Image (spheres, rainbow, N blue to C red):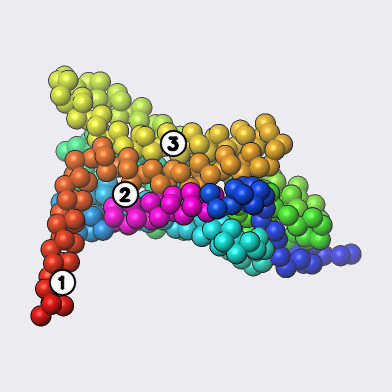
C-alpha cells in the first residue's frame, strides 16, 4: 500500500492577486508602501516603549510584543510577494511554502493570544485598580507571554505536520499571494478529510476561547464603567480601552470577513483580496490606532524624536571635527 507521507512535488506556483502584467507595478508599489509603513510604525512603537521609563507597565509590555508580532506576521508573506512581482517568478519551493505556513499561523495565533491578554490586563486595571500591581506582576506577565508562544508554536507545528502527511502530485497552482493552508491542502492528491477536520476543530477552539475571554473581560469592564458616578471618570475609563477595542474589532471583523467570503464565494481571487485586509492592512493600522488615541504614546514618540534628533546632531558634529 502506498504511503501518504511522501510528496512528488518540490515547487508550487503562487498566482498572486492578479495575472495582469499591467497591474503588477501598481501592486508592487502599493504593497511595498504598506509594508514599509507597517514595519516603521510598529518598530517606532517598540523603540518608544523601550526608551520611555514611564511606559514600562504590563499594558505597554504586551503592546510592544504585539507590534513585534505584527512586523513578523506581515514579513512572512509580503516580502516574498514583492520578490515574485519584481522578478516575475512565482515559484515557491515546498520547504519554503511549509515554512511560510508555519510562520504565518504562529504569528497570527500570537496576535490573537496577545489581544486576549491585553483585554485581561484592561479588566484588572479598570475593575480591580487597587490590586493591579499585585495581580499583573512581572512573573505573571512573563508566564502569560511564554504560554502564548508555546501554544502558538505547538499549534503551528501540528498543522505543518498534518500537511507533511499529504501527497502533492496534481495541479500545483495556488490562487493566492502566499501559501494559505486551506489552498495548499486542496491541491493534495491524497485524502484530506483529517486535515480539514483538524483545521475546523482547532481553528474554532483557538478562535472561540480567546474571543470568549475578550467578551467576558469587556462585559465586566463596561459594567464597572457604568457604575462610575462622574462623566469625566467614565470618559477616562473608556479612553483607556478605546485603542484596544478598536484593534480587536478590526482583527476579528476582518478575520470573520475572510472566513465568510471563503465560505460563500468560489472565486479564489476574491478570497485572496479579502485576506489582504487581515494579513497586511490591520498590522499597518495598529500603530496609528495606538499612537493617535494614546497621550502616553504621543509623549513617548516626542521624546524618541528629540533623542534621535540630538543623537543625529552629535554624530554630525563628530564627523565635522
Mark 3 or 1 closer to N-term? 3
Magenta segment range? 27-46
Magenta stretch, main secondary structure, is helix
Marks 2 and 1 close (CB-CB < 8 Å): no
Tell me the distance, in whole angstroms, between the alpha carbons under discs 2 and 3: 16 Å
* Label 3–label 1 contact, CB within 8 A: no
Between disc 2 and disc 1, whose residue precedes? 2
Please indicate whether residue 137 sits to the left or right of residue 194 in the image: left
Q: Which mark is residue 63?
A: 2
Residue 262 in picture, x, y percent from top left:
65, 37
- Quarter occupied by residue 306: bottom left
Residue located beneath label 1 in the image: 316
What is the spatial separation of the Cα atoms under label 3 and label 1, in whole angstroms? 43 Å
**Along the line of sight, which residue is nearer the eye, 244 or 91?**
91
Quadrant occupied by the N terminus = bottom right
The front one of 308 and 185 is: 308
Amino acid at each position: 500500500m502506498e504511503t501518504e507521507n511522501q510528496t512528488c512535488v518540490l515547487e508550487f506556483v503562487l498566482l498572486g492577486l492578479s495575472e495582469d502584467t499591467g497591474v503588477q507595478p501598481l501592486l508592487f508599489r502599493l504593497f511595498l508602501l504598506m509594508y514599509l509603513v507597517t514595519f516603521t510604525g510598529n518598530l517606532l512603537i517598540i523603540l518608544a516603549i523601550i526608551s520611555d521609563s514611564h511606559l514600562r507597565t504590563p499594558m505597554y509590555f504586551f503592546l510592544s510584543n504585539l507590534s513585534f508580532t505584527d512586523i513578523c506576521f506581515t514579513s512572512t508573506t509580503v516580502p516574498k510577494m514583492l520578490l515574485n512581482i519584481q522578478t516575475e517568478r512565482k515559484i515557491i519551493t515546498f520547504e519554503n511554502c511549509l515554512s511560510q505556513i508555519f510562520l504565518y499561523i504562529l504569528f497570527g495565533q500570537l496576535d490573537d493570544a496577545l489581544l486576549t491578554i491585553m483585554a485581561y490586563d484592561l479588566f484588572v486595571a479598570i475593575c480591580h485598580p487597587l490590586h493591579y500591581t499585585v495581580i499583573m506582576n512581572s512573573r505573571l506577565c512573563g508566564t502569560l507571554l511564554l504560554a502564548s508562544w508555546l501554544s502558538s508554536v505547538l499549534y503551528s507545528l501540528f498543522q505543518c505536520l498534518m500537511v507533511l502527511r499529504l501527497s502533492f502530485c496534481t495541479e500545483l497552482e495556488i490562487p493566492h499571494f502566499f501559501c494559505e493552508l486551506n489552498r495548499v491542502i486542496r491541491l493534495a492528491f491524497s485524502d484530506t478529510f483529517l486535515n480539514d477536520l483538524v483545521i475546523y476543530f482547532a481553528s474554532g477552539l483557538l478562535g472561540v476561547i480567546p474571543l470568549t475571554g475578550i467578551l467576558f473581560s469587556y462585559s465586566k469592564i463596561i459594567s464597572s464603567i457604568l457604575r462610575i458616578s462622574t462623566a469625566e471618570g467614565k470618559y477616562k475609563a473608556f479612553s483607556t480601552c478605546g485603542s484596544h477595542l478598536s484593534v480587536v474589532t478590526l482583527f476579528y471583523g476582518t478575520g470573520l470577513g475572510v472566513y465568510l467570503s471563503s465560505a460563500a464565494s468560489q472565486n479564489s481571487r476574491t478570497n485572496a483580496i479579502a485576506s489582504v485586509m487581515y494579513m497586511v492592512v490591520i498590522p499597518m493600522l495598529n500603530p496609528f490606532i495606538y499612537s493617535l488615541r494614546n497621550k502616553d504614546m504621543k509623549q513617548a514618540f516626542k521624546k524618541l524624536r528629540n533623542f534621535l534628533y540630538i543623537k543625529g546632531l552629535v554624530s554630525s558634529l563628530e564627523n565635522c571635527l
